[in-house]
């Protein structure tokens, strides 16, 4: 079965800190991953697609990188409005869509 | 601008049937894959299934196949998610989503979510 993992499961950082979340795809056929942000009580929204492409309207402090099975989401300077849970997602044409378990980001 | 408007919250009992819906505006509904994502209380996101309304081609997550039915109505640009017999474990928020991308697909638009509460 496809199994997407993320680390850490939660983190606490100060405003202005650089924050990095890691996603491991289950197999290198993933080729790319996508990232979503879910603020408390809200629907998720697409943040980054195809590993490194910012969705329209997403601030440039967010960036994505990676290849094969290892991918990262970075917030270059954490802001109070970035408090959310972040999910990565991969796709393969057998098992279709798989989300990581999420990383909860808080302000210290 | 694409907008996915979902039906309202539901409170049901175990064993009852339920259909929730999602109406798409501002997009080419016929040729957009529309799917459903479950979020159980305090948990993560799980893709359930998707449909291509033009020809009703449907794909399911094996974990949900046989438990739910995804359908589409071209006349109203609406996608539906149906249970024939609910369980308490179906209590969750359900989001409809539009698929985009190639060859690795993602969900670029999300509905506001429908809360389903099932009591035993």
Image (cartoon, coloured by chain):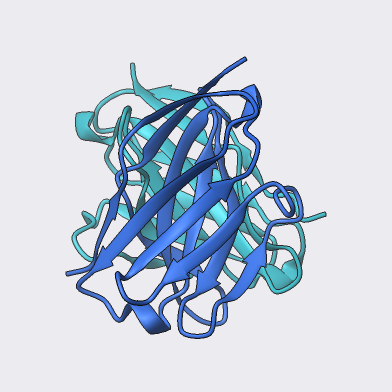
* Quarter holding residue B50: bottom right
Q: Where is A73 relative to B107, above or below?
A: above
Measured as percent of width and height from the top left, residue A11 is found at: 47, 25
Question: Residue pushed farthest right?
Answer: A1
- In the rendered structure, the colour chosen for chain B is blue
Question: Residue pushed farthest front?
Answer: B16
Image point (38%, 39%), residue name? B114
Measured as percent of width and height from the top left, residue A33 is found at: 55, 62
Foreground: A22 or A97? A97
Foreground: B28 or A80? B28
Foreground: B42 or B16? B16
Tell me if I can see residue A49 in this picture: no
Disc count in the image? 0
Which chain is rendered cyan in the image? A
Measured as percent of width and height from the top left, residue B117 is found at: 48, 24
Image point (76%, 70%), residue name? A94
Tell me if I can see residue B35 in this picture: yes
Image point (20%, 73%), residue name? B26
Image point (41%, 54%), residue name? B96
Measured as percent of width and height from the top left, residue A84 is found at: 35, 32
């Amino acid at each position: 079965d496809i199994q997407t993992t993320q680390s850490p499961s939660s983190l606490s950082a100060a405003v202005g800190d650089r924050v990095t979340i890691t996603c491991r795809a289950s197999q290198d056929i993933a080729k790319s991953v996508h990232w979503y942000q879910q603020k408390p009580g809200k629907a998720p929204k697409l943040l980054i697609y195809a590993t490194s492409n910012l969705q329209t309207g997403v601030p440039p402090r967010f960036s994505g990188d990676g290849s094969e099975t290892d991918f990262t989401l970075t917030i270059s300077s954490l802001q109070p409005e970035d408090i959310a849970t972040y999910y990565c997602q991969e796709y393969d044409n057998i098992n279709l869509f798989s989300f990581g378990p999420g990383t909860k980001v808080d302000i210290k | 601008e694409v907008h996915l408007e979902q039906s309202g919250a539901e409170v049901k009992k175990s064993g009852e049937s339920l259909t929730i819906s999602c109406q798409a505006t501002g997009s080419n509904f016929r040729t957009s894959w529309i799917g459903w994502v479950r979020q159980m209380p305090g948990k993560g996101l799980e893709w359930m299934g998707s449909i291509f309304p033009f020809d009703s081609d449907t794909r399911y997550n094996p974990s949900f196949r046989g438990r739910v039915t995804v359908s589409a109505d071209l006349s109203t640009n609406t996608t539906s998610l149906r249970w024939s017999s609910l369980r308490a474990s179906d209590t969750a928020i359900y989001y409809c989503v539009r698929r985009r991308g190639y060859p690795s697909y993602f969900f670029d638009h999300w509905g506001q979510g429908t809360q389903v509460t099932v009591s035993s």
